[in-house]
Image (cartoon, rainbow, N blue to C red):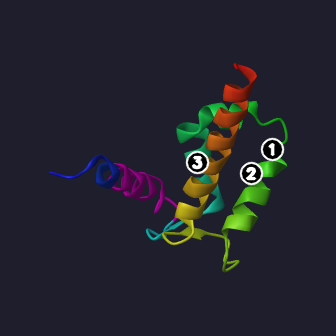
Amino acid sequence: MPTETERCIESLIALFQKYNGKDKNSCQLSKTEFLSFMNTELATIRKNQKDPSVFDCMMNKLDLNSDGHLDSQEFPNLIGGLAIACHESFLQTSKKNI
């Protein structure tokens, strides 16, 4: 039986697979697929972001090989960055509540 961490990793892999391939390449997320992922899976973050160019900037920073897509090695950087941002936000909120 997989551990909780293993299930989380499997879930992230399944998410990547769910959104890639609609634009012909099943091993990468295109910009359109990336935005679809953000709009659906991270709707609150997307909704709270006032500047739509932030997502273009994110895509460009995450696309380490500058091919215009996020591959399976670049996608975890998105998840890691979001986890760090959420953790920092949690810490700030915790300090305010003390």
Q: Tell me which corner region of the image, top left, top right, bottom left or bottom right, holds residue 51.
A: top right
Give the secondary structure at mark 3: helix
| Outermost residue to the front | 98
2 and 1 marks in contact (CB < 8 Å):
yes
Q: Which mark is residue 52?
A: 1
What is the spatial separation of the Cα atoms under label 3 and label 2, in whole angstroms? 16 Å
**Nearer to us in this view, 51 or 33:** 51
Decide: is 94 above or below 56: above
Q: Which residues are magenta?
A: 8-23
Q: At 37% from the left edge and 56% from the top edge, which residue is drawn?
A: 9
The answer to if 82 sits in the magenta stretch is no
| x, y percent for residue 93 | 70, 27
| Outermost residue to the bottom | 65
Which residue in the structure is indicated by mark 3?
83
What amino acid does circle 3 point to? Ala
Foreground mark, 1 or 3, reads 3
The answer to if 19 sits in the magenta stretch is yes
What is the spatial separation of the Cα atoms under label 1 and label 3, in whole angstroms? 21 Å
| x, y percent for residue 2 | 21, 52
Badge 2: residue crowd in 10 Å (few <14, some 14–19, many ≥20): some
| x, y percent for residue 39 | 61, 40
Give the secondary structure at mark 2: helix
Foreground mark, 3 or 2, reads 3
Q: Which mark is residue 55?
A: 2
